[in-house]
Image (cartoon, rainbow, N blue to C red):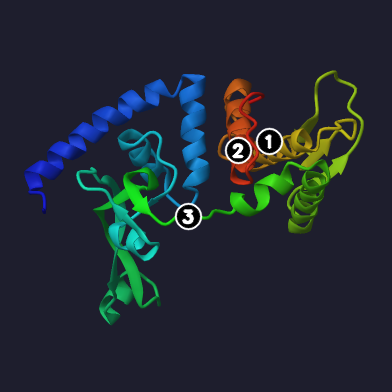
Amino acid sequence: MARTKAEIKAWEHEMAQRATEQLSALADTQKFKQYLRQNAAFHGYSVRNVLLINMQHPNATRVAGFKQWDKLGRHIRKGEHAIKITMPIVKKLTPEEQVKYKTSAERAIVGYRYGSVFDVSQTNGKALLSANDFIKERLGDHQNVDRLYHAVVDAINTEGHVKVSESPIDEPGVRGFFRPSTQEIVISPQETDAAMKLKTLFHEYGHSQLHGIGQVFADRPRAWQEAQAESVAYIAMQNIGIDTGDYS
C-alpha cells in the first residue's frame, strides 16, 4: 500500500531522530562492531543505506527486494515489516538534458526514492550459499592466510601509490606502521600469526588512504585516526570470514 506524502514526511522525521540516537549509541564498542559488521555485509550499499538498515534491523545480514528473494527461492513471511532504503531513479536523458548536465551518457540518476528490502531472517525457503561457505574453512589455515597476505602486498605494490615492505620494528608491541613522508607501509616480519599480519596490513593501508599527506582526514587527532584505520581492518577481515573482534 502506497504511503501518502504526510506519512513519508513523518517517517523521515522519525528516521532522523533515530539516526541521532543510533550514532550516539555507536560510541559503545560492541554496537560499533555490529555496525561495522553490517558495513562488511553490505559493502555495495551507501553509508546512508547501511545506517538505515542498521536503524530498522540491527541484526540484518543479507537483504534483497521481494522479487530478488523470489528468484532465490525464498519468500517473505506474512506480517514481516519491510526495511526502507533509498534507491536511485534512473532516467533516459534527452539531447537537451545531456547538454545541460554536460554528459554524453544516455541515462543518469535524477533523484532517489524509498524502496523496500527484507533481511534473510524475514524469509523462508531454499538455503543460501555465500563466499564464506567456500573459503572460510580454508582461510583458517595458516598457509592460506599467509598466501592471501602476500597477494594483498603484491596488489598494493603493483598499484604504485603506496609501497609495502617488511623490516624489524624495535618498538615493543608494534606490528607495523605507515610513513606518510615516503608513502611506505612497514610490516614486522617477526609477527608469526598470519591473520594478525594481514589485519595489520589492512590497518596500515587504511592509514595510507585516509591519513597520508593531503588526505581528507590527515589533520584528525591520533585516536580518531586509529579508530578509522582499525575499522577498515575489521571490515576487511570480516569480508574474508575472519573475526578479529577480540583484538579490535
Q: Number of marks in the image? A: 3
Question: Residue 203 — which label?
Answer: 1
* Residue displayed at 34% across by 73% down: 107
Label 2 crowd bin: few (<14), some (14–19), many (20+), radius 10 Å? many
Q: Is residue 181 above or below residue 24?
A: below
Distance between the alpha carbons at the discs numbered 1 and 2: 6 Å
Q: Which mark is residue 99?
A: none
Q: Give the amino acid type for the residue marked by disc 2 in the picture.
A: Val
Q: Position of residue 92 (x, y in %)?
A: 29, 76
Residue 4 percent across, percent down from the top left: 7, 49
Which amino acid type is shown beneath numbered disc 3?
Leu
Mark 1–mark 3 Cα distance, whole angstroms, equals 31 Å
Contact check, label 1 and label 2, Cβ < 8 Å = yes
Quarter of the image holding residue 244? top right
Query: Mark 3 to mark 2: distance in Å?
Result: 27 Å
Task: Return the residue nearer the eye: 59 or 198.
Answer: 59
Kindly identify the residue that appears in the image at 77 percent across and 32 percent down. Answer: 177
User: Where residue 232 sits in the image (x, y, percent)?
Assistant: 60, 38
Q: Which badge, 1 or 3, is on the more N-terminal residue?
A: 3
Q: Can residue 182 be seen in this snapshot?
A: no
Q: Which residue is mark 3?
A: 128
